[in-house]
Image (cartoon, grey):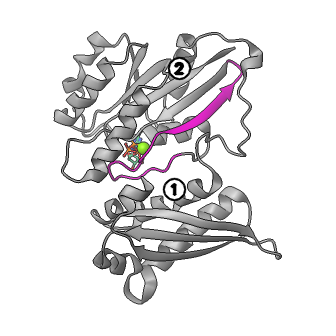
Amino acid sequence: MKQGNVLLIGRPNVGKSTFLNNVIGQKVAITSPKPQTTRFAIKAIYQNEKGEIIFIDTPGIMKKTEDNLSEKINKKTLQALNEEVDVALYMIDHTRKRDFEEARVLGLVRQIKKPKILVINKIDIQEKSYLPQYKFLEEEFPDVFQISALKKLHIKPLIDRVFQLLPEVKEDKKTKNLNPYPVLNLDAKNFIAELIREKVFLMMGEEIPYTTTAIVDEISERENGVMYIKARILTNNERYKGMLIGAKGRKIKEIGSYARKEISLATGKKVYLDLTVEVDPHWVEIYL
Ligand SMILES: Nc1nc2c(ncn2[C@@H]2O[C@H](COP(=O)(O)OP(=O)(O)OP(=O)(O)O)[C@@H](O)[C@H]2O)c(=O)[nH]1
Ligand SMILES: [Mg+2]
């Protein structure tokens, strides 16, 4: 069988995590239209009759910025590049112009001395395209695939090609995944915290997600079979806390209810989510 590590790399928002989820067939990485939704490398396993792929989804590399959050997140991607990689998927979004950020990612991709595939994502969008700006890349990358991660278009030929490029290993090397889900490097608490953070990314305006993180303190099963989860959203100042709570606590209720429904669906259990908002100006240093 074939087996290996496949790195997903690209600018923020190109659709790396959407691709991962749709290949695996369930949500393993959170997604949103906001940049650097992914904050650390996520490893998830995909298996079929040909073998197995350990995908490493990374945070999109951002332009150098002053705040230490994005620098810290960028570092996580740089670390992932130093891990053992058998194939790299360099994903681009043809609906966005090529720019300095893209050049920076390309520079990193060039340092990877392993087979690489250029993946042009979002081909379901036709109206707005800068594809000619990316044409020159086709000389550098022998393998080019145009896909739609969201609409699941042309994914199979890409996966087939990945398997061709992966090394052959003996059947007994098969990964024994003890997790109940395909994510290899997140436990239940961290996974649920990610789902909560996704709702903050989806339901709050531009700046707030970057000032927040989510922490799950407790998961326990109550006698009546209800899964009790105690979680906190941390933000770095009082003003954001107020916005997260909303008038009469409406916003936090909305975030909680949306998160609870998804956790319930994912676990097949009734969920009680005790969600609060706290100010912690040092969460980046502590939790990332
Ligand atoms: N139309 C369209 N939208 C897509 C496609 N793939 C992803 N998106 C959207 O693009 C946005 C970003 O997707 P993500 O999967 O979070 O992107 P990412 O590359 O993981 O981003 P970071 O984690 O921030 O680096 C989301 O709103 C997705 O729904 C696609 O094939 N077509
Ligand atoms: Mg992502």
Horizontal side of residue 109 vs 145, given as left or right: left
**What amino acid type should be assigned to the residue bearing mark 1?**
Glu
Most common SS among magenta residues: loop
User: Which residue was labeled with disc 1?
Assistant: 194
> Quick check: which quadrant has ligand 2?
top left
Q: Nearer the viewer, mark 1 or mark 2?
A: 1
Between residues 80 and 258, which one lies in front from this camera angle? 80
Marks 1 and 2, how far apart at CA:
30 Å
From the top left corner, tell me how far across and down residue 167 is, in percent: 59, 11
Between residues 46 and 59, which one lies in front from this camera angle? 59
Between residues 136 and 213, which one lies in front from this camera angle? 213
Q: Residue at x 74, y 31 (%)?
A: 176
In the image, residue 262 lies in the stretch drawn in magenta: no
Circle 2 SS class: helix
**Farthest bottom residue?**
248
Mark 2 neighbour density, 10 Å: few (under 14) some (14–19) many (20 or more): few
Q: Start and end of the magenta stretch? A: 29-50
In the image, residue 31 lies in the stretch drawn in magenta: yes
Horizontal side of residue 253 vs 34, given as left or right: right
